[in-house]
């Protein structure tokens, strides 16, 4: 039995963002076609200054692969004390026909890539066709990744960006302008930035309301990325009152996503959630229905996105003869 | 960052049973010293003729290692259709200081080894000092593993063995006699076998009472291995009524071990459980207190046994310069 080993550089070279957009769509469609088994994830929290490590498991019947992603984060002393990043990842792929371990790959990059792609998938399904202006609340790595993905599927005319750290904001502007040639306006206030948005992306991992309901103009599509755990929040729950609410997984979003907040405040009930993104991709439910509605995509991230993306990377590696084989059993 | 890769043959060569007995004792002591974090395991069941794959996670504060064992079983068509065993395993070890992946090893052997060792640990703590005769109900791989472990810690004079399959029983006799030089009596009935026992081992994974209460003579120590899931059973629950009941984990045994059955029938209450094996090893609770009591050790298996055993294998490999390093990240 041969197991393919792929390091971080190989993983990076084996997939491009347009492919990840495809694998994330594949994941969402499989999820809403009853082709997915995703047990609740398990994790271990270490005492500070250490962080946590989570294990996420997904089985996709469409590709007959089982994936397990171990991902750590928040080990702030790692670079200095141990010479390794503050978060790392490993993905195992098992052939679901035999449960043979067919691949062990570095998993540092996949979470960022597939989360970026999720925003782009939602833009295709829910943003206005004439959308040109993006507002980015938060300007860290995932904010960049969102742009890297969305520029694959539309022409971005300008980005209005805001961050509470002026240096981070200036670096974002410099990076985006040099890497993608998209002009970035550094907003003086969140309000000013939000009012410009055709598409509003929040990636701050904030812990309270950052975006007020009255700032959001009709027709805006909101990509809510930062809230994937209880205790995190980015949007004024009032934004949900009259919006078209789409979740990646209703189970996850109502428990620990941005959608939890308006539910908790009784601003909406579960019936007010329009549906899951996979239902829109499958044509079971409509996407945007007019130019004026505010749409919200709440993305908490699913193991099955790792599964379909890692499977594509594995297949590309086999096809391109990239990687090293190791025999764990003969 | 370097990750050590160990294949099945290397794992096998890197640890001996007497060391596993030590690592299992270490695990039990850590468990009862609040040094262990073991989230509930997650698994995926595939449709027949496929089996299941489970993921078990353990963090041991005593050795600062986090282990994840993926183990599959029940893929009955694997040898013929895929050329691989019907069950396989993989263990990841993470340094809990940084969560760096320090080792990926084949995990096919560890479950069998540490389960065998658990019986021997219980024999040391609970069997009569003059015990000489073992009765084995069930004569498969784990039945052999129990003998391999117990012979490390006592002199076995004779084994009375029973199996509902005569061929399996005959092969067990031949194997045990040639490998260990211990005479095996093939019992004509379970009753005949059980009545001979100083130590009674059940490893059948049966689904009903195999051992009647009236057959068990005073002073017997019972090693109950086969029941680790709801629906499995080997012992007449009446055996528990006046026995000293010891669990590996009370949480697990009362939910899915042999101990669940007498609880469910109100033959015992939770207070009748003497304690956990780690409490005996730590001296918090007594082991056997007289020559006449019947003692039962209910072993459901814990992730932390994989953790301490895999850690020892890893340390032996590093010391002996065995294995192959791979850099998943530079």
Image (spheres, coloured by chain):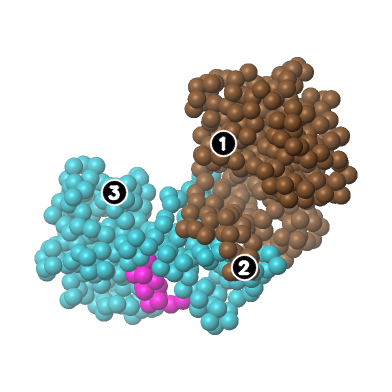
Chain colours: A brown, B cyan
Marks 3 and 2: which is nearer the front?
2
Residue at left offset 35%, top offset 56%: B300
Is A29 left, or right, of A36 in this rendering? right
- Is residue B178 shown above or below A108? below
B23 magenta-colored: yes
Mark 3–mark 2 CB contact (< 8 Å): no
Mark 2–mark 1 CB contact (< 8 Å): no
Chain letter for the residue marked with disc 3 in the picture = B
- Is residue B115 shown above or below A268? below
Residue B165 position in % (x across, y down) = 36, 58
Residue at left offset 11%, top offset 65%: B292
- Mark 1: few, some, or many residues within 10 Å (few <14, many ≥20)? few
Marks 1 and 3: which is nearer the front?
1
What residue span does the magenta drawing correspond to? Answer: B12-28
Q: Secondary structure at mark 1?
A: strand
Question: Where, by quadrant of the figure, is residue B125 drawn?
Answer: bottom left
Residue at left offset 81%, top offset 39%: A185
- Mark 2: few, some, or many residues within 10 Å (few <14, many ≥20)? few
Say which residue label 3 marks.
Answer: B254
Q: CA distance from mark 1 to mark 3?
A: 43 Å
Q: Secondary structure at mark 2?
A: helix
Could you say which is closer to the camera, residue B116 or residue B309?
B309
Say which residue label 2 marks.
Answer: A80
Say which residue label 1 marks.
Answer: A208
Quadrant of image for the N terminus of chain A:
bottom right
Is B29 left, or right, of B212 in this rendering? right
Is A70 left, or right, of B220 in this rendering? right
Residue B207 position in % (x across, y down) = 33, 47
The tag on residue B315 is: none
Residue A273 position in % (x across, y down) = 59, 23
């Amino acid at each position: 039995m041969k197991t393919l080993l792929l390091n971080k550089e190989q993983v990076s070279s084996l997939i491009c963002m347009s492919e990840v957009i495809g694998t994330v769509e594949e994941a969402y469609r499989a999820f809403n076609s009853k082709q997915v088994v995703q047990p609740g994830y398990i994790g271990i929290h270490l005492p500070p200054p250490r962080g946590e490590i989570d294990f996420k498991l997904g089985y996709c019947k469409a590709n007959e692969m089982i994936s397990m992603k171990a991902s750590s984060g928040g080990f702030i002393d790692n670079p200095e004390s141990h010479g390794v990043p503050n978060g790392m990842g490993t993905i195992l792929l098992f052939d679901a026909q035999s449960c043979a371990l067919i691949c062990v790959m570095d998993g540092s990059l996949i979470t960022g890539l597939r989360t970026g792609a999720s925003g782009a998938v939602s833009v295709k399904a829910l943003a206005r066709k004439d959308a040109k202006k993006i507002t980015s609340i938060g300007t860290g790595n995932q904010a960049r990744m969102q742009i890297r993905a969305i520029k694959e599927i539309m022409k971005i005319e300008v980005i209005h960006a805001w961050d509470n750290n002026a240096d981070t904001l200036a670096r974002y502007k410099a990076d985006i302008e040099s890497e993608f040639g998209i002009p970035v306006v550094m907003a003086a206030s969140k309000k000013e930035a939000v009012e410009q948005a055709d598409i509003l992306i929040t990636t701050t991992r904030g812990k309270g309301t950052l975006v007020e309901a009255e700032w959001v103009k009709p027709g805006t599509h909101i990509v809510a990325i930062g809230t994937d755990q209880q205790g995190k929040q980015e949007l004024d729950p009032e934004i949900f009152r009259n919006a078209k609410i789409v979740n990646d997984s209703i189970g996850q979003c109502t428990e620990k996503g941005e959608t939890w907040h308006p539910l908790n405040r009784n601003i909406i009930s579960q019936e007010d959630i329009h549906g899951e993104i996979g239902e829109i991709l499958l044509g079971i439910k409509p996407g945007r229905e007019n130019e004026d509605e505010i749409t919200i995509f709440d993305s908490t991230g699913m193991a099955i996105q790792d599964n379909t993306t890692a499977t594509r990377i594995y297949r590309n590696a086999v096809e391109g003869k990239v990687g090293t084989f190791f025999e764990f059993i003969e």
